[in-house]
Image (cartoon, grey):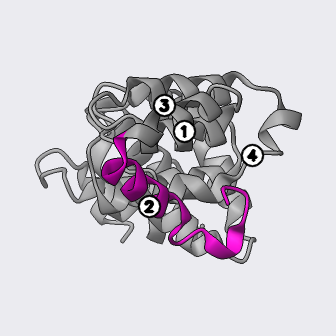
Amino acid sequence: MLSDEKKKSWSLKALKCICGARPDLVKTVTAHALTASGIAKAALLYCASFADPEPVFEALTELAEASVEKRGQQPTQLLEQIELKWAGHEDLFVQLLRLRETPLALAILEQEYIYPTLGECEIGPIDWWLEWLLQERKAASGDWFCHRMACLFARVLNAGARHAFVAEFNRTASRFGACSPIVSFLIFPILLPMSSAQTPFHFYSRI
């Protein structure tokens, strides 16, 4: 059931409801979880662990540290059904994004977009993210991915990262600047939380 993508819209939710109605089955689900790894383990623990989400985060930490080969075998679609409160786990969220695996990233971005819980995030140098976004814009789901990432950045970046994006936008020689299609997806949502007093005047001269 966990690996069946045709049932991804309901399978995990159904199992969670069953665990809620049949507490006697929780031990069985937990036992199966302990024989699994990565996303499958996190999904099963999500169904069995109602009061304590920490085992789910521990399983996702294992996923972040797994090899590329093991991650490639994971049922990524299940992440779309796992509703977590990420506050306090911002570093793990960024670590999962930095795996640079777009299907996985989209899954956690979508949940965070619908149920925003993250606090301020430290993302490091912005060039790495811009390179990824520019690369993904060529994909079929590229515009969607860029939009979701921009919405996340607009909400969780600290002031230093926001200003780094604006500075890159204003840099004449930047290939990420005003002539790049990425700007419409990324720069403007990031600037929305900034007051006009915080935004450099020369930014407006380039709009």
Q: Which residue is mark 1?
A: 29
- Residue count near mark 1 (Cα–Cα under 10 Å), binned few <14, some 14–19, many ≥20: many
Q: Is residue 186 above or below residue 69?
A: below
Q: Quadrant of the C terminus?
A: bottom left
Q: Which mark is residue 13?
A: 2
Q: Which mark is residue 27?
A: 3
Q: What amino acid type should be assigned to the residue bearing mark 2?
A: Lys
Q: Earlier in the sequence, mark 1 or mark 4?
A: 1
Q: Position of residue 107 (x, y in %)?
A: 54, 56
Q: Nearer the viewer, mark 2 or mark 4?
A: 2
Q: Which residue is mark 4?
A: 74
Q: Nearer the viewer, residue 37 or 132?
A: 37
Query: What range of the chain is rendered magenta?
Result: 1-23
Q: Are marks 1 and 3 in contact (CB under 8 Å)?
A: yes
Mark 1 → mark 3, Cα distance in angstroms: 6 Å
Q: Is residue 67 visible?
A: yes
Q: Secondary structure at mark 1?
A: helix
Q: Nearer the viewer, mark 1 or mark 2?
A: 1
